Image (tube, coloured by chain):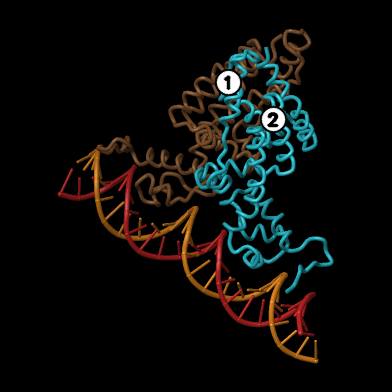
Chain colours: A cyan, B brown, C red, D orange
Amino acid sequence: MVKKQKKIEDKTAEEKILAAAKKVFTTKGMAGARMQDIADEAGINKALLHYYFRDKDKLFEVVFMEEAQKFFPKINAIFNSDAALFEKIENFVNEYIDEMLENPYLPWFVLNEVNRDPDQFMYKIWGKDNLPKPGKFLEQIEKEVKKGTIKKIHPMHLLMNLISMTIFPFVAKPMMIRNLRMNELQFSQAMQQRRMEIPKFIIDAIKK
Amino acid sequence: MVKKQKKIEDKTAEEKILAAAKKVFTTKGMAGARMQDIADEAGINKALLHYYFRDKDKLFEVVFMEEAQKFFPKINAIFNSDAALFEKIENFVNEYIDEMLENPYLPWFVLNEVNRDPDQFMYKIWGKDNLPKPGKFLEQIEKEVKKGTIKKIHPMHLLMNLISMTIFPFVAKPMMIRNLRMNELQFSQAMQQRRMEIPKFIIDAIKK
DNA sequence: ATATAGTTTAACCAAATGGTTAACAAAAGT
DNA sequence: ACTTTTGTTAACCATTTGGTTAAACTATAT
């Protein structure tokens, strides 16, 4: 049995394929991506794709599902922790921005998948039992409202606002860059600022 | 010359094609959509698609570009009007929610296109000269900050927040519906509420 | 009626595309 | 050394898919 055939070059074929697939799937989507494009991008033969990853669907799944399965439970954990409301909001924003700065393709991929077949995708991510439970977070907001520590607001809308402000700029990145006349660096700097800006904005909006 | 061949049935073939194309393009995207799917959905022969709309690209463009070209200048007009800041925010939210409740496919389509080829898409929508100028809106925010009528906030982030909160729930609709355990009706009711909720949230966040 | 312009279809075609095969090259094991 | 396993390729195949063609059908005008 062979351990791993390390070339003199840095990357093994499998790694090159994964990186290339990530890039092509991200920019063209599952349907728009061509196996030939991925092979070219990786600088290898098309047949190798099938040697390592049986077919297009498998490759697609390997590329994205792994990351998604790691990430989403983290978010779930934040929502369900015993931390204070404002702290949860900060954690959520930070965790998400971390993830998206490292994997800019992820939110786009998730939206595509969830539009294509919500049930199957959700099942793959959360498994049979580990479903996302925004319940605790929503109740926590409700409680704070009743206690009078924050302004009256429908918990659902607060949650939507939080999620939207965090994720959307990444999804609409090309539009942001184009219309606000930014470059790549300015964009990621802006996203770094949002770690502070979003929680501040929300807290200003709801604290009494 | 014949006026228009109205069948005893309600819809003419052309209309059926447009409706079907809208549906299929929306759910599967440009690359994922099959001409055969559209023909089936419309209940007509594939060749008819090419009879009415030369090819796939043309059909795609006719379906969406028309609406986009009507809609975006409206938004631009709001940003560049002489209305007060808070009024602009309200107008923006209302105009957008109107549009997306009627054409739920639009934001998804726009994001897809803008990811595929930002420059060409923007050009098609705005034409050569009529570019989107967020400048005036951003300056207006800056001015209010300096006047001290609103809290100190980076105009770009305020704009991002506004856009994100308005659009994202529609883009991520299947996820919202699934994770917040809603049905179609509840979703559109929630979006109606957001006409008030979003401006209120923003104003609470920035007014002194 | 029948000629005409517009509409619809079945059958085809060529190109693109996902996937396979068989042969070859490089390591690893013996 | 040489056999076996793993990695890689060019050539090929089968299917899908966008698009075409020619014929048939329908409504209207003359």
Q: Is A67 rendered above or below residue A98?
A: below
* Residue appearing at x 81%, y 67% in the figure: A7
Residue with the mark numbered 2 = A179
Residue B133 visible within the image:
no
Q: Is residue B43 visible?
A: yes
Residue B174 lies, with reference to residue A84, above or below; the image says below
* Residue under the point 57% across and 38% down: A132
Determine which quarter of the picture holds residue A39. Answer: bottom right
Q: Residue furthest right?
A: A8
Chain of the residue where label 2 is placed in the rendered structure? A
Q: Nearer the viewer, residue A180 or A91?
A: A91
* D22 sits left or right of A30 in the view: left
Callouts 2 and 1 in the same chain = yes
Q: Residues within 10 Å of mark 1 (few under 14, many from 20)?
A: some
The residue that label 1 is drawn on is: A142
Q: Nearer the viewer, residue A69 or B74?
A: A69
* Residue A92, above or below B53: above
Q: Could you tell me residue A25's position as x and y percent?
A: 63, 51
Q: Type of residue at label 1? A: Glu
Q: Earlier in the sequence, mark 2 or mark 1?
A: 1
- Give the distance between the C-alpha atoms of the residues marked 2 and 1, in whole angstroms: 38 Å
Q: The residue under label 2 is which amino acid type? A: Asn
Counting from the top left corner in percent of width and height, residue A192 is at 78, 32
